[in-house]
Amino acid sequence: FIGMNSGLFYSCSLNLYSLAVVKYNKPDRYIRSKVEPFLHGIPVVLALIGSITLLAEQNINNGGGNCYAPVYKPPHCIGYEDGQTREGFDIPCGRGHDGAVLFFYVGGLTTTFLVPLIIGSSLGIIHRSVSKQENNMAGYGASNINRSNSRLVLHRVIAYSVSYVLTWSFSIIGIGFEIANMEWPTALWYLANIFNPLQGFFNFVIYIFPKVIRAKSRGDDNMTWFQAFKIAFMGGETGRATGRPRQEPCNRIPQAPGGRVGTMSTRDATTTEQLGEDDA
């Protein structure tokens, strides 16, 4: 239950991190000291509060493979009223009505409306900001490489948003069935239990994929994809011939018409490259 709730809000944190870099041009030092503690802490604290509350009220039950807050109605409770305990069992049938109300309506509201709203609105703001940065850089004569960096950042944010949809859409639909006091369709139950645990895997693939591509492109012709993955996973990058870290050329500052230095395009390129290289 803790992982399920913290995972939901962590999806918001990924988009809000990108928003701080792309839209508000916050430097890495500022993000690490002022923003990241909240992006990590708020999901964990909210999940702990919800879990401890339900656990203290003895409202954590088996939800068909997950421990959360459904009403306790296993097959052996058929024919028994809520509050009755069948002989040979310790947990009363129907346990968790209070917890079910809290989970269905507070948790359902969060997963169905609040989290998608935060992810969707932040994605829209980032898309608008990237488009504006591309237009500004084009006006200052920035290279296509710098403009493509902004687009890569946007693609990364879209990928994280798709990861959220794949992970949680089936569970959100199932919560809707529970709120309507209906049983989950069997196929939906299996899909939710297959995809719900995969959010960490999806995010890992999104995070490591560009690093593997970069390591492969900087390695020699005999480098395999597994070797590139190992280099990316261990955090190292090699040069083509020497095996030493490759030094990037200094960015040329684009100049605006009339010979003026294009400071706007330089700043935009720096922030988007920062997110593309060090996205967490």
Image (cartoon, rainbow, N blue to C red):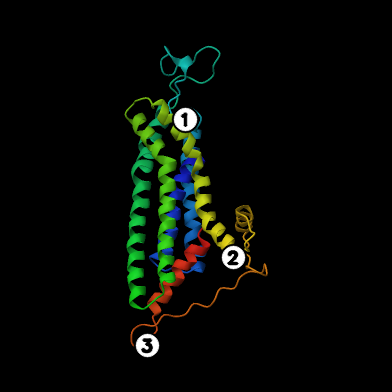
Q: Position of residue 278 (x, y in %)?
A: 52, 62
Graded by Cα atoms within 10 Å as few (under 14), some (14 to 19) or many (20 or more), the crowding at tag 1 reads many
Q: In the figure, is residue 196 to the left or right of 183?
A: right
Please report the residue visible at 35 percent of the width from the left and 60 percent of the height from the top.
127
Callout 1: SS: loop
Q: Position of residue 124 (x, y in %)?
A: 33, 57
Q: Nearer the viewer, mark 3 or mark 1?
A: 3
Per the image, the residue denoted by label 2 is 218
Vertical side of 182 occupied by 7: above or below:
below
Per the image, the residue denoted by label 3 is 259
Callout 2: SS: helix
Q: Pointers 3 and 1 in contact (CB under 8 A)?
A: no
Q: Nearer the viewer, mark 2 or mark 3?
A: 2
Q: Position of residue 241 (x, y in %)?
A: 65, 69
Mark found first going from the N terminus, 3 or 1: 1
Task: Identify the mark at residue 59; answer none if there is no mark.
Answer: 1
The residue closer to the viewer here, 74 or 188, is 188
